[in-house]
Amino acid sequence: MVDPLLLPDRDRDARQRLIDAGLEIFGTYNLEGATTRQLAEHAGVNQAAIPYYFGGKEGLYVAVIEYLFSTNFAVIGPVVNALQEQLTAKKPTRDEALALLKKLLGAMMERMLTRKASSTWARIIMREQMQPTQAFSVIYDKGIRRVHETVSLLLAIILARKPTDRKVILRSHMVVGQVLIFLAGRETIRRRLNLTGYTDEEVKEIKQALEEQLDLLRFEAETRK
């Protein structure tokens, strides 16, 4: 396996074409079901390019995961960074925390539902949740953990609990799930509401429904006083 930074432009192009092929092939067949022949043919390269650039099929799979997060988290990452800076500088009020939570989840939803590759991204991530491979550490460390921890910090303020409270962490998982269900359960909601899956107007409607659902947290916190 060679360092991609040391590759000439022609080799970088071939390497990227393999990553693009991996997005499609791994999304369809998963790691075990995908073959090096399929990957190489889809990328228009020789099969020997896979071990040369990535050390093997597993290395290509990890590179695909890293690429997914470098492109997707490039949008979500700055939102998470800004929220963490705000939380460090000053503890927000309950209403401010709720507004920040809406901002974070709204950004996640908009990014996930408006990307053409969202279905491929979703299939890979969902499979990793059910049957984790060595690549799950990349997924967790580079994206999921920071988002999950930030949601817990905000939810703890809203519910007047500690962010390390097991119930807060469980609830955080449920809250994030309200976004992910529109990927994992995409076909169900398309059929229930006859959606095209998803236009800008449909994403806007889903975000409004999410905000209304999150507003219920405010009423729950009020009743617990």
Image (cartoon, rainbow, N blue to C red):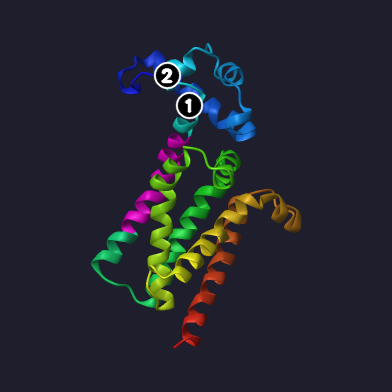
- Percent of width and height locating residue 22: 54, 28
> 75 and 36: which one is in front?
36
| Local crowd size for mark 1, using a 10 Å CA cut-off: few (<14), some (14–19), many (≥20) | many
Left/right placement of residue 71 relative to residue 115 reads left
Location of the N terminus by quadrant is top left
> 206 and 217: which one is in front?
217
**Is residue 60 on the magenta stretch?**
no
Q: Residue at the location (57% across, 19% down)?
A: 36
> 210 and 136: which one is in front?
136
User: Magenta region, mostly helix, strand or loop?
Assistant: helix
Residue 130 numbered mark, or none: none
Q: Which residues are magenta?
A: 65-82
> 46 and 140: which one is in front?
140
- Percent of width and height locating residue 112: 53, 48
**Is residue 76 on the magenta stretch?**
yes
Location of the C terminus by quadrant is bottom left
Residue marked by disc 2: 53
Residue marked by disc 1: 60
Place residue 153 in its image quadrant. Answer: bottom left
In three-dimensional space, the C-alpha distance between marks 1 and 2, rounded to whole angstroms, equals: 8 Å
Q: Are marks 1 and 2 in contact (CB under 8 Å)?
A: yes
- Percent of width and height locating residue 24: 59, 30
Amino acid marked by disc 2: Tyr
Q: Residue at the location (60% across, 61% down)?
A: 205
